[in-house]
Amino acid sequence: MSQFQLHDSQRRTTVPFVPLDPEHVRVYYCGPTVYDVPHIGNLRAMLTADILIRLLRRLYPRVTFVRNITDVDDKITARAAANGEDIGSLTARTTAEFHAGLAAMNMTPPDIEPRATHNIGEMQAMIARLIKQGHAYEAEGHVLFSVASFASYGALSGRDPDELVAGARVEVAPYKRDPGDFVLWKPSTPEMPGWVSPWGRGRPGWHIECSAMAHRYLGESFDIHGGGSDLLFPHHENERAQSLCCFPGGKFANYWLHNAMLLVEGEKMSKSLGNFYTLSDVLDKGPVEALRLLLMSAQYRSVLNFTWAGLEESRRTLDRFYRALETAGAVDVSGRGVPQAFLEALCDDLNTPKAIAEMHVLATAALAGDREAAADLKVAGGMIGLLTQEPEVWFRGGADAGGPGEAEIAALIAERLAARKAKDFARADEIRAQLTDQGVVLEDGAGGTTWRRA
Ligand SMILES: Nc1ncnc2c1ncn2[C@@H]1O[C@H](COP(=O)(O)OP(=O)(O)OP(=O)(O)O)[C@@H](O)[C@H]1O
Ligand SMILES: [Zn+2]
């Protein structure tokens, strides 16, 4: 069996992955804050998780993948107010859009997807315990975590606590004992979402949400905690502090995995900067597999600059792979193992560029008539969510076929389903009308929606 090595942010080096329980690997990922559609930067984080889980499932008999939904947050409250929409409808709609986008991207769904608002009791229990153990204190309706009470605060992100305090940009609230102390619970005004608690009606801080959900579903110690590098500090540092202080017998996460940012014009793609592309922006110009391949063209720890030329190049790479499969004709891949060199590339800290280079080697052989290589190529692609179509479908549905491509149609169907779930029937009808205009007929049946060209 290939040995999986991954870069652990806390150890700051690449180490062999040794699961706590080889029979059952457990992973926690920070999920989206549901106030807007995901952008393709968020999708890079989700794709890193997807590749990790696909690999772990090859290597271990059982994997539990937990990814939360943050559905209580001040950004959500503010957006709902700005939209004149109630919070429940905003979070339901954006959660449905998130699910539809990830399904269209062929991402592995989590086994458990807890919502913050369904875990308030767990958060309150942890906060009460932290107060009792002297790691948190109440002040003016807030409960704060005392960073001075945790000697290894800063160890994950490699920051010196004193430096952190000196560098704090935000104005320090007068009730904090130490400027680095962070909120576990805060009071809510009547129009804000809130829950009854021993500290008055209020709402949780963001960090305690993940600590509580990770504990509830994975216990005091689990294998891997992942997320984007923008979450390393303060979010993950604070999650770790809370969890280790609350459950000193546990390890919390044994390995920390962080993907680098997706950039656009050299800047982080983000909702707050407004420089982002959504999945549907991209699907207007290229198929889903091209976006997956583009996001895998750099190893997850390297920054990746998004360009339309890069998307086009990924589509051409896929053309080459599909051409290789087409040349070989039908190949039988049932029961076939993943090619060793390809698997080893993924085991090397999810080195997707190296894995794709292995696919090129196989494609070259397949184009020269090697049918075994074509079968290997198909299996390798399938493992990372590529080459999932028949070559004729890929080429027929390609950009120059006239009418929308398969991936685009699938994405529109997913979006229409999300719109219907959110009771946005106007949008759902608009999507059907748009597809009809483009010569695509939808048929709703018991098993879901199918389509055919008119
Ligand atoms: N540009 C990016 N590149 C890669 N990953 C990203 C990028 N932006 C956000 N992420 C990751 O996406 C995941 C979901 O994040 P979340 O929904 O909290 O994003 P957000 O903070 O609302 O987005 P933004 O940072 O755009 O305001 C997190 O793991 C986060 O680290
Ligand atoms: Zn988190």
Image (spheres, rainbow, N blue to C red):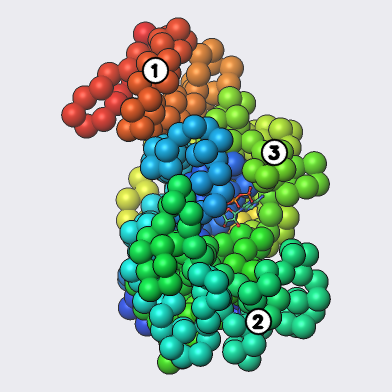
For marks 2 and 1, give the one nearer the viewer. Answer: 2
Q: Which amino acid type is shown beneath numbered disc 3?
A: Gly
For marks 3 and 2, give the one nearer the viewer. Answer: 2
Find the distance from the CA under tag 3 to the CA under tag 2.
36 Å
Q: Viewed as shown, does residue 393 lie left or right of 365? A: left
Q: Nearer the viewer, residue 180 or 450?
A: 180
Query: Is residue 394 among what the camera can see?
Result: yes
Q: Earlier in the sequence, mark 2 or mark 1?
A: 2
The residue singled out by tag 2 in the image is: 177
Q: Which amino acid type is shown beneath numbered disc 1?
A: Ala
Q: Nearer the viewer, residue 326 or 186?
A: 186
Is label 1 in a helix, a strand or a loop?
helix
If the image is split into quadrants, where does the C terminus sit?
top left
**Disc 2, disc 1: CB below 8 Å?**
no
Residue 401's place in the image compared with 342, above or below, is above
> Where residue 426 is drawn, which disc sits there?
1
> Percent x, y for residue 353?
65, 55
Crowding near the residue tagged with mark 1, few <14, some 14–19, many ≥20 C-alpha atoms within 10 Å: few
Q: In which quadrant of the rendered view does residue 219 lie?
A: bottom left
**Disc 1, disc 3: CB below 8 Å?**
no
Is label 3 in a helix, a strand or a loop?
loop
Find the distance from the CA under tag 1 to the CA under tag 3.
26 Å
Q: Is mark 1 within 8 Å of ligand 1?
A: no
Q: Residue at x 72, y 43 (%)?
A: 273
Q: Which amino acid type is shown beneath numbered disc 2?
A: Arg
Residue 171's place in the image compared with 298, above or below, is below
Q: Viewed as shown, does residue 34 lie left or right of 64? A: right
Q: Viewed as shown, does residue 5 lie left or right of 374? A: right
Q: Residue at x 29, y 26 (%)?
A: 449
The residue singled out by tag 3 in the image is: 274
Is label 2 in a helix, a strand or a loop?
loop
